[in-house]
Amino acid sequence: MASPRPDRARTFALACSLAASLASGALAAGCGTTDDRPATLEVVALEVLAPTCGTPQCHSTTTRLEGLAFDTLATARSSLRELGVTGGRGGELLEVLREDGDERMPPDMPMFEQDVALIEKWIAAGAPGL
Amino acid sequence: MRPLAILLAAVLALAVSGAARRADAYPQYQLARDATCTGCHLSPAGGGLLSENGLVVAEQASWLGTNPEALYGAPLPPWLHLGGDVRGAAGAVSNGTPGGAAYPMQAEVSAAAGARGVTVHVTGGLRRPQGEGGSAAHVLWSREHYLMWQQHPDGSEGLYVRAGRFMPVLGLRLAEHVAYTQRFGASPLYGEAYAAAASYVSRALEVHATGFVHDSIASAVEHGDGGALYAEARLGAHAALGAGAKYASSDEVHRTYAGLTGKLYLPGADLLLQAEAQLIHQRLLPGGTVDQLAAYFLATRPLVRAWLLDVGLGHYAQDVSVMGLYRDCVDVNVHWMTTSHLEWLVTTRLELLDGGGGPNGGYALLQVHYRI
């Protein structure tokens, strides 16, 4: 099948859309405000732990490295209990997030400081929902 | 991004545009070849088993051009296609503290059998056992299995209908599952579900509509039930624009994904640009919402014969309402298709939290991909 002639206007429009896709990322990053997320198990589990720790090849329900899963509220609840997290006590969770050596988690990228602070705040509040 | 990251991205972009060129085929070169995913793959979504044309392309694109057929040409009946993938990786990983890593990635066999446009597709292999207390290091499972009807069995365009276990179709569907739009977006690794889908594929337009329910037997990554719709239209000879959405509802969260994709091939520079952005709206149950954004840009260019260079840029805002809660990455991948079956891949990533203002991480891995 013969290829149609390139349409420069359409190509230009598409190049603009590609640029817009990238720019949207920068805009989204710049639109945020200070962190006033509620320190609840739902936010800790589904917003923080699921994308950071519950990745498919690591602590997902499918893979369960070390027997732990953080990709759902239910599995995060049981895994946090297994790590010794209780109201007022961070257990192994905060240890591995704060670790300086090669035991630090996640292995490929540190967790956001704001997320660690949110987890600590939730624990200090008695780990409601656990 | 901070100035250092911008400078690094600019240097990499210059390296891409200034490198020697040679236009061999590769899945990322769909627009360079005026082809569809089904031009090389049996599945209308792309990926997996190669068609006759895909095997020819695999041979042409490789350094040594060995026999590309499954098992190097083992005699198979015409109603049967076989294939498979074995992959592993080793290298260095850093989350602020450098460390080593070596691990198997994939060990799967695929088969498609049928006639007169009706085929059964199965992909199965090894994975880690689920749950605790299991003594086996790995267990057998099937990631994909479905029945497919194809309107034109001898062609690569037209209508496809599938039912079974497979990935709902949305977005660019890059092979690199670590791309932010896949890792954090609607099509994560192991995101297959039990689904029914209708796809229309032609050079000018492709449309995919999928309804799905989660796999409650194998505890899949997709925990919700819902649907996905994706359409992509060719604009001229070397550009395409797509849009899609996915909705998945579980008893914990309702997630809505809305995304745009774009592809632009620049013949003069022999460069393919692909970009995707997804807005992800999550409604947590019993209350609260989170809006996220995942975007990925990939520039791909052939070097000398059988060598390919990718430069990727990713952005992920974990919660767009919170300042500084985002990460960016710069990826550089070098592919060497040594034979029709063997590919070496050096993949590197520099990942920056809060525009580089926080601790950073990354990896440099050598991957080996062997296609059976």
Image: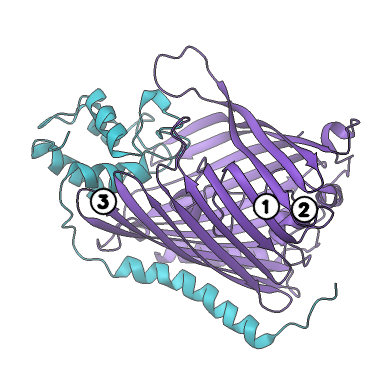
Residue toward you, A23 or B237: B237
Badge 1 amino acid: Gly
Discs 1 and 3 share one subunit: yes
Place residue A121 in its image quadrant.
Answer: top left
Q: Mark 2 or mark 1: which comes first in sequence? A: 2
Q: Which mark is residue B284?
A: 3
Asked if residue B95 can be seen in this view, the reply is yes
Which element is circle 3 on?
strand
Subunit bearing disc 3: B
Discs 2 and 3 share one subunit: yes
Residue wearing tag 2: B40
Residue B229 is situated, as x and y percent measured from the top left of the image, at 52, 61
Which element is circle 1 on?
loop
Q: Identify by letter the chain in purple.
A: B
Residue A22 is situated, as x and y percent measured from the top left of the image, at 47, 69
What is the display colour for chain A? cyan
Badge 3 amino acid: Leu
Residue toward you, B250 or B182: B250
Q: Mark 1 or mark 3: which comes first in sequence? A: 1
Subunit bearing disc 2: B
Badge 2 amino acid: Cys
Residue wearing tag 1: B46
Vertical order, A39 against A54 (above or below): below
Residue A12 is situated, as x and y percent measured from the top left of the image, at 61, 83
Vertical order, B52 against B316 (above or below): above
Per the model, the C-alpha gap separating discs 2 and 3 is 41 Å
Per the model, the C-alpha gap separating discs 1 and 3 is 33 Å
Q: Is residue B190 left or right of residue B86?
A: left
Q: Are marks 2 and 1 in contact (CB under 8 Å)?
A: yes
Q: Which quadrant holds the C terminus of chain B?
A: top right
Q: Mark 2 or mark 3: which comes first in sequence? A: 2
Q: Is residue B70 left or right of residue A16?
A: right
